[in-house]
Amino acid sequence: MLLTVHATVGAIIGDNVSTPLLAFVLAFISHFILDIFPHGDEELVKAYRNDFKNKGMIYLIFFDIIATLILLPVLFYSQKINFNITVIWGIIGGVIPDIFVGLYEITHKYFRRTYKFHNFTHNKLGKFFGTKTNLSLPLKFGLLIQIILIYLILF
Ligand SMILES: [Zn+2]
């Protein structure tokens, strides 16, 4: 799922709990729960694993980071979410699983457990419905759902 969604949910969690540690832990857990739902990047991930020259995933991550870096300051500036250390730890907890996954993809050494668990959560819903492969949504549809999701959790 988009970092934009994970960071926003992490920030909201941080805004509603009392300690940075609690914010981090709950946001970290929220990442895996959100990732259970199919979110449209399944085909891009597969394409990237088959051919590392496939740039689709890189573009998506790039735009995702830019969107996050625009959205969060807007939320703080408009005082939709408070800006404090607890919120920052919520954001970190929300996005860090994907950073661990990226580090494992690069090193094939560190954060192997997080990587496996992350894959497990992604496959869970597909298994639940008895399909062999992951449930996958078209990217546009997945992105649209996530943009609507961000809107719904904020307004
Ligand atoms: Zn993830």
Image (spheres, rainbow, N blue to C red):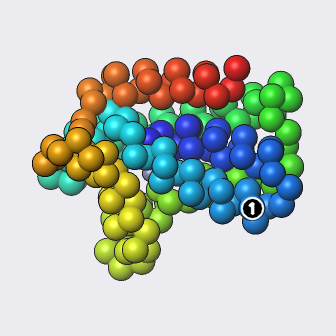
Q: Is mark 1 within 8 Å of ligand 1?
A: no
Residue 131's quadrant in the figure?
Answer: top left
Examine the rendered structure and indicate whether residue 82 appears above or below residue 113: above
Residue identified by numbered label 1: 22
**Residue positioned 73% across, 56% down in the render:** 23
Quadrant of the snapshot with the N terminus: top left
Residue 61 placed where, x, y %?
43, 42
Nearest to the observer: residue 9 or residue 129: 129
Examine the rendered structure and indicate whether residue 108 appears above or below residue 47: below
Examine the rendered structure and indicate whether residue 63 appears above or below residue 133: above
Q: Is residue 55 left or right of residue 28?
A: left
Q: Is residue 58 left or right of residue 47?
A: right
Nearest to the observer: residue 128 or residue 17: 128
Residue neighbourhood size for the residue with mark 1, other residues' Cα within 10 Å, grouped as few (<14), some (14–19), many (≥20): some
What amino acid is found at the position of numbered circle 1 in the picture? Leu
Q: Secondary structure at mark 1?
A: helix
